[in-house]
Amino acid sequence: MDIAVCHGRIVLVGDASHVLIGPETAVVDVTGRYLCPGLIDSHMHVESTMVDLPCFAAGVLPQGTTTICPDIHELTNVLGMKAVDLFYQSARQLPLKVLIAMPVCVPALPGMEDAGAAVTPDLVRKAYESGRVFLQGEQMNFPGVIYGNEDVHQTIAAGMASGKVLTGHYASTDLNAGLNAYIASGITADHETTTSKGADARAMRGMYVQQRYGSAWLDLPQLVESITLDPGGDTRFYTLVTDDVTAATIVTEGHLVRVVRKAIQLGINPITALQMATINPAQMLEASRWIGSLTPGRAADILVVDNLTQFTISRVYCDGVQVALDDQLSHPVSGFVYPEWALNTVHLDLLTPLDFQIIAPSNGPVQVRVIQLVPDRVNTLLKTATLEPRNRCVNADPGQDLAKAGVFYRHSPNGTADKSRGLGFVSGTGFLAGTAYASTVSHDCHNLLVVGTDDAAMALAANTLIESHGGLAVVMENRVLAHLPLPLGGIMGLSSMETTAQGVQKIEKALSRIGCPHKSFEMTLSLLGLVVLGELHLSNRGLVALQEGQPPRFVDLILDS
Amino acid sequence: MDIAVCHGRIVLVGDASHVLIGPETAVVDVTGRYLCPGLIDSHMHVESTMVDLPCFAAGVLPQGTTTICPDIHELTNVLGMKAVDLFYQSARQLPLKVLIAMPVCVPALPGMEDAGAAVTPDLVRKAYESGRVFLQGEQMNFPGVIYGNEDVHQTIAAGMASGKVLTGHYASTDLNAGLNAYIASGITADHETTTSKGADARAMRGMYVQQRYGSAWLDLPQLVESITLDPGGDTRFYTLVTDDVTAATIVTEGHLVRVVRKAIQLGINPITALQMATINPAQMLEASRWIGSLTPGRAADILVVDNLTQFTISRVYCDGVQVALDDQLSHPVSGFVYPEWALNTVHLDLLTPLDFQIIAPSNGPVQVRVIQLVPDRVNTLLKTATLEPRNRCVNADPGQDLAKAGVFYRHSPNGTADKSRGLGFVSGTGFLAGTAYASTVSHDCHNLLVVGTDDAAMALAANTLIESHGGLAVVMENRVLAHLPLPLGGIMGLSSMETTAQGVQKIEKALSRIGCPHKSFEMTLSLLGLVVLGELHLSNRGLVALQEGQPPRFVDLILDS
């Protein structure tokens, strides 16, 4: 079987012996190998890798990812609609196809947190008019969808009017009334199911199941029974996505190819697994006339695969141009020069230990609400604990595995949220006495998050980031153990995937040195401020509790005695 | 399992016990039955039924057809772009979803025939801007696609720029270079394959196989091995279509439901067969967020099916409204009042026997080219025959089964084509001496076609139609045996499906009386003028030969001796 390519498109699949071979025609003999369409990641956040788009492309192209649908709500939380422009501009010269998903939940929970911008239905409409975004990003406000929030439905209406495919984030376990209402709104894809029952419930209702296998949220093994236990079943509504993966995962295990391999390992037929990363997402995106199959008229995004079960890729073509050979980039990927405003986004005066002080109503023991972290899970648990104030100050208690946490608004020095902060307690870090961790990667508002067992250490960690325009930092005994600067919006660096992976590794080693027993704990911590998740989270406005069947609400840190 | 419907859309699939049942809520108990999505016919011509759109809807809704994609090139050949407006307006009040396919080949072969209008790329573009058409109709000029005809590619470009799905008509047996080029142009659906090999070749190249089972072109049984011999294969690119069915077929056997039943009889799993008439065409049309499945957010086009294998339908809902119960329409379908110009389209003065005279160069025997009809096939064969002129006139010879044929331009009394006509000989009719058949249903230009064994009989048949503004007529021994008036564009009547079927039946009985041994022969004759088909056809400009690998060309009726 031959494939002929012209002007970046496949023009023939069959016998090309009649095709004129001119001096500029490249003939590649791939006898004995497999040719597959390039992989399509229909839901992901580039920001999770902490590298910028060109470095991301350079990292994932050799692994066969040729199309991504980045929901850029992280950078948009920092930069507003300018983030869409930055992504659009930085994607233009890339071989990687970047189908931008318009972020529609910025901030995730208006009224309960403050980001650098707010995306209104009107801005969404304007973005569609600009022609720079391809689909509608994840609608995280599922209660707003179900209970008829006006703004949420105006945003959905804007997407429908523009013919956009709408994607979801339905993080509830209600698979009847709630799920039906959510799908009935017009949202036809979702990556939040963590059970095969949830996958079944979605697919049978015409919602694409975006089976997630990220660095930390490893849902795929729990989902595949929806397919493997139903051998004759129709799998066209199943796709594979990464959602959030780190640079380290991409460097050591691979990007979407890792998910395809995992699916095969889990017992899914290799062809079916491949469909879930090619034709199925292409149909989901209503883009199958362009991408997702090796057929005439489609983009010549072609992988040469040596072994279908191991899914080892030896060559990658984008629009007919070879971009990678034997795991190495073989085509230049040009970097992007960012404007100063994109690299200077941590607008905070230096902090002092006093900024972390929590005052008790009296000097007796106090009961406090505690965010119980659960490693490798996105949700937290709402717990309580008893602490003994010292001089009316309620401090962290490493003995009980209780650290203090602070979230500081950092976006605009002029906004009404300036100087706002939330303080609380966190359990499950394992942090030793005198240690702290700080990060400006703190979903979704990306305010400055500081977690530690000592107010001075917390101030040092925070100030390290304020001075370097954002990033991650670990402090122990008044010393910065590790520091990864992330100047682009305070959430992404300008280094390669490998360098960034090493930087994160240093952070993780430092986290381990300060007592944390868990892997990739910086990812778990980065969700401490994600107030749309259950059960307890911390925003710059305070503690937010979210419990099944109830709207989110602010709760006091210290319980009434 | 419950289905809840609101405002014409499905809002819940699952357990509706929590749903409020108000005084205006209809509760329908269908325990023990199956619920299926309404059937979608993604390629068809309403004109083939000879009934107008409201009567068509009234006929097919009780049979479960809820969406059609009419390629209205027949009426457009007569009325030009006004046909699009007529269809759009007459569809507006119907429960049937009418997704108009923009006809792009009017006339089918410019320069070799004359229709009532010519559709240019610019008119196609304007139609897309009007928002009145949903997809691009069949591109019949496949040589034009393959060999780079400028107008053809401008039309394709117009469709792509508007995001339309482009449909095809690839009637060649070249499954390599030609088929690849055709698909590479961007056309992603085709109904012209007559072999399972052709079906395989299309589906594997990302082209939807629109498996046809019309009244006369019975391709489906020849195609299904593409599916039945590959039990685990992916069938998402296979659909079922009717293309051309008569009112009689619909009345006696059913519309698309007949094709679904046939597919099941041929060994296709009922669920797969149903997918080929629901979700598959919906995905092909990139309309699966609206139609094609019983899932939340989609139109409540629902069939209650009593028996899945027999596929017996007892109720039909369109947008949540019951339109049919037990094979009977249960919801009014309003008719449409047509303007006078749509009902008066046969612009011809009365003919005389002299209009059919063919003069020989000398009085000796002449060799003539003959159109050999093949019953139940769309193609003809190019044959030759020897005839003895009488007084230099070359006449039909019923003894050799040679009838005379004439095609008379009938559209505009002012056009350059006025008074143009083509004459020829036809074999395979079986017509007795002194008989004739006339029709203004003559694909695709719908000029006045007359076939007969006697010039006077031919004139009488022709004049019967000129006086009644078009239709079908059969003449024997100077008497009109049967006459079906079709005043709408000269190709459709204003009667119900049943009445029209009876009218056609009378024509068929009359055809049988005048000697024709074949069933539904009026359909075979209606393609006598379709010059895009091989091997020999007759237009108002003369005989057109089309042979494999050659462009179409005019040929002389009488061969040089």
Image: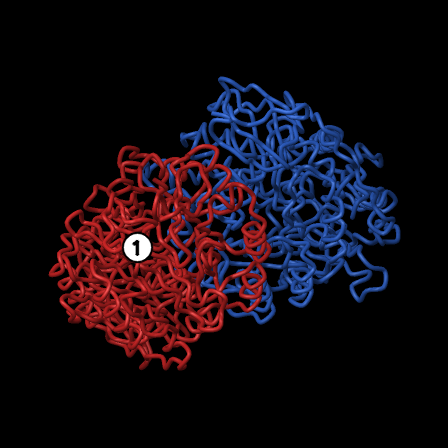
Chain colours: A blue, B red
- Viewer can see residue B370: yes
Q: Quadrant of the C terminus of chain A?
A: bottom right
Residue placed at 50% from the left, 24% from the top? Answer: A34
Q: What element carries label 1?
A: loop
The foreground one among A452 and A32 is: A32
Q: How many labels does the image show?
A: 1
Q: In this view, does A66 lie above or below A352?
A: above
Chain under label 1? B
Disc 1 marks a residue whose amino acid type is Thr
Seen as rendered, the residue at the extreme left is B513
Report x, y in % for residue B430. 16, 52
Q: Residues within 10 Å of mark 1 (few under 14, many from 20)?
A: many
The answer to which quarter of the image holds residue A80 is bottom right
The foreground one among B65 and B189 is: B189
Residue at numbered disc 1? B242
Report x, y in % for residue A137. 60, 54
Relative placement, left or right, of A52 versus B14 is right
The answer to which quarter of the image holds residue B92 is bottom left
Report x, y in % for residue A487. 81, 43
- Viewer can see residue A534: no
Report x, y in % for residue A266. 43, 30
Q: Is residue B284 above or below residue B22?
A: above
The foreground one among B406 and B327 is: B406
Relative placement, left or right, of B426 versus B341 is left
Relative placement, left or right, of B550 versus B374 is right
Residue placed at 51% from the left, 18% from the top? Answer: A31
